[in-house]
Image: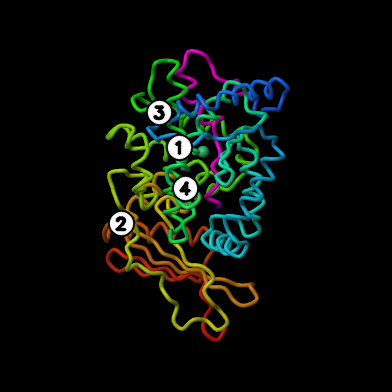
Amino acid sequence: MNRALTLSWALAMLMGPAAAAPAPVIAADNPPYAATEQNRATAAAALQEVDALLKRASEITGLPVRRPVRNALASRESIRRYIRQRLKEVASSEKLRAQEVALKKFGFLPPEYDLQSATEQLLTEQAAAYYDPKRQQIYIADWTPVELQRPAIVHELTHALQDQQVVLDQFLEDKKLNQDQQMAREAVVEGAAVLAMMDYLLAATGLRADTLPNLDEMIAAATTAEIQKFPVYASAPLYLRESLLFPYTVGMQYVRALVQARGKTAYAESLRSPPQSTAEVLHPEARGRAVPADLQAPEPSPLPAGYSRLITDVLGELDVRILLQQYSGEETARQVAAGWRGLRFAVYENKDRTSAFLVHRSRWAGAAAAEAFAAAYRNLLEGKGEKNARIEVQRDTVSVYEGVPKAGS
Ligand SMILES: [Zn+2]
C-alpha cells in the first residue's frame, strides 16, 4: 500500500460534524459528485481565498506560514494521472511486487488480486483534493461539492504547512522506517489535517474539534455510512479499507488527544517526535511502543534449495488486528492485537517466482497474550487452508513457519 499520497477524504470525514452543525453540509445520497459548471466556478472562487485560508490553517495548527502555497483546480482524469505517477515514484515496481506477495501470503489479499491497479482506482475514486509536495501546490477536484471546498482546502493547506515544517516526503518515506512506522507517521499527517479541517468547519458554529464530545463516534458512524457509497471502496478487501481509513479516523483521535493534553503545539511536536508504531497511535498512553531491536524473523534452517529472501518487514498492531479480524471476528482481533509488542516477518521465494513461504516471530505482552495470538493464528491457518505450518510458543514469543517446503522436495 502506498503511504505518501496526501489526499482528502473530506467527503466522508465531514459528514460527522455536519450533523452537529445547524445546516446539513451535503446531500449524502448524491455520491457521484459530478463536475458541474457551478462546482467549477465556486471552487475557483474558493481558491481565490487560499492566502486567507492558509493563515486560518496556521492559526488553528500553530504551524507557521513560511511561504505562500500555489493552487489549481483538477479534473478526475488529471488526479488519476497524478496518482499513477506518484505510485511509481514512491516505490520501485520490485518493492511493490514483494509487498504484494507478502500481503497475499499472510492472507490480506486474494491470490489473483492486482494491488497496484486496485490502489490507483481506490485513490482516484476517493480523492477530493490533494497536496503535491514536489510542486508545493494544492489541488481541488472540480467535482468537490461547494460546501466541502473550503474545508478540503484547509485540509490540504495543513499538509502544506506540515511540509514547510518537516519536508513531508522525507517524513513519510524515510527508507529507515519499517512499514508500521510509516503508517504511524501517515496517521499523524492525516490526523492533524482532518482535525484542522474539523476545527475550521466547526468555527462557524462556535464549537471546537478538540472539545466537542462524541466527535469520534459521530465521525466513525458518518464515515462508515458515507464511504460505503463509493463502489470501489465498498468492494475492496478489508485490509485496503481499514488501512485507508486508519490515518484519517484513528489518526485524528490520536492528534486530538495530544492537542487536548498540550494545546496546539502538539501539531508541531507530533511531527518532531512522531509515534513509533500504530500501537502507539491506537494507545497514545503507550508512548514509544516499538518493535524491539532484538526481535528478528526466524531463519528457516536449512533454507530450502533455490529459495532466497524476498522481503522482511514489520507487521504492526493495526495489521495484526485486520488480519485476525478476517477469521476470528472484530472483538477477538482487537483484544489479541492489543497484546502486540512487535512482529517481524520474512517471505522467501524460489528463483522462478512460482512458490513462496512465510515465517514470522512476534512478541506479546506476556505468556497469556502470546498463547491468545497463537490460538487466533491457528484459527487463521485453518481458515486459509494452510496445513503445512508450525507454531512455536516460548513464554511471550511466538514463531511461525508457514508453507516451508520439506527438504529434498
Ligand atoms: Zn490529507
Q: Label 4, secondary structure: give it.
A: loop
Give whichever of discs 1 and 2 has the lower sequence position: 1
Q: Is residue 302 above or below residue 157?
A: below
Q: Give 264 or 25, whichever is nearer the viewer.
A: 264
> Range of the magenta residues?
2-29
The disc placed on residue 60 is 3
The disc placed on residue 66 is 1
Give the number of the mark in front: 1 or 3: 1
Q: In this view, does 204 lie above or below 243?
A: above
Amino acid, disc 2: Ala
- Would you call the spot at circle 2 few (<14 residues within 10 Å), some (14-19), or many (20 or more)? many
Q: Give 72 or 328, whichever is nearer the viewer.
A: 72
Q: Residue drawn 40% across and 28% down?
A: 60
Left or right side of 225 for 181: left
Amino acid, disc 4: Val
Q: Residue drawn 32% across and 63% down?
A: 292
Asked if the residues shown at circle 2 and circle 4 are in contact, with their CB atoms under 8 angstroms apart, the answer is no
Left or right side of 323 for 363: left
